[in-house]
């Protein structure tokens, strides 16, 4: 009986430590650099283009409060997914450095793994930074290190970006 109690207490302490570490990580990301990738309000974005290396460009427009895919297919898009893509504009930049500090090919930007254009502002996504869970992102003549949690929103099959048809 005593062993069970000790194990449960150890497990609870481990879970508490993990939660504290996650909270600390989020606080560090927010305070390390208050800058965001773009000075755009994600809710105001009306045009999105995603280009994955080797794939066709996927284009979207917001009309009448909803997102529509215009290429490679046409149809109503998943509003929640496009809100996630637009939210990348407000992703925290953990660090900014001039492009001249890097060899673009060495950080995956020649060519980029993915390109995201929000209302004409282009973000080019490179590789993961060594020893960090952050990705190199080119914004104009600067490179930002951005938490990698935003990258999965880019690599989605175009079929999954279309809204599910309404059922009757």
Image (cartoon, grey):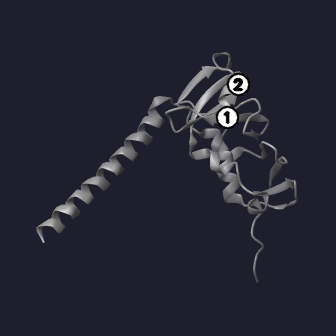
Residue 137 x/y as whole percent: 65, 32
- Evaluate whether residue 64 shows in this view: no
Q: Is residue 131 left or right of residue 73?
A: left
Quarter of the rendering containing residue 70: bottom right
Quarter of the rendering containing residue 135: top right
Residue 34 x/y as whole percent: 51, 31
Q: Is residue 30 above or below residue 99?
A: below
Question: What residue does disc 2 label?
Answer: 104
Q: Quadrant of the N terminus?
A: bottom left
10 Å neighbourhood of mark 2: few (<14), some, or many (≥20)?
some
The answer to whether the residues at label 1 and label 2 have Cβ atoms under 8 Å apart is yes
Question: SS of the residue at dot 1?
Answer: strand
Question: What residue does disc 1 label?
Answer: 126
Quarter of the rendering containing residue 65: bottom right
Q: Nearer the viewer, residue 14 or 19?
A: 14
**The residue positioned farthest toward the left in the image shown:** 2
The residue at 57%/42% (across/down) is 148
Residue 29 x/y as whole percent: 47, 36
Measure the alpha-carbon separation of dots 1 and 2.
8 Å
Q: Nearer the viewer, residue 60 or 95?
A: 95
The residue at 65%/29% (across/down) is 107
**The residue positioned farthest toward the bottom in the image shown:** 168
Question: SS of the residue at dot 2?
Answer: helix
10 Å neighbourhood of mark 1: few (<14), some, or many (≥20)?
many
**The residue positioned farthest toward the top in the image shown:** 100
Q: Quadrant of the C terminus?
A: bottom right
Residue 16 x/y as whole percent: 29, 53
């Amino acid at each position: 009986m005593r062993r069970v109690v000790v194990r449960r207490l150890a497990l609870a302490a481990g879970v508490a430590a993990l939660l504290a570490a996650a909270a600390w990580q989020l606080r560090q990301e927010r305070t390390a650099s208050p800058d965001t990738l773009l000075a755009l309000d994600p809710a105001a974005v009306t045009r999105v283009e995603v280009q994955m290396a080797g794939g066709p460009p996927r284009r979207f427009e917001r009309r009448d409060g909803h997102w529509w895919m215009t290429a490679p297919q046409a149809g109503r898009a998943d509003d929640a997914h496009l809100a996630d893509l637009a939210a990348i504009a407000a992703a925290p930049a953990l660090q900014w450095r001039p492009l001249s500090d890097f060899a673009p090919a060495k950080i995956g930007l020649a060519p980029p793994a993915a390109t995201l254009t929000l209302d004409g502002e282009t973000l080019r996504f490179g590789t993961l930074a060594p020893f960090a869970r952050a990705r190199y992102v080119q914004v104009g003549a600067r490179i930002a290190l951005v938490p990698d949690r935003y990258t999965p929103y880019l690599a989605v099959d175009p079929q999954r970006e279309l809204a599910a048809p309404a059922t009757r």
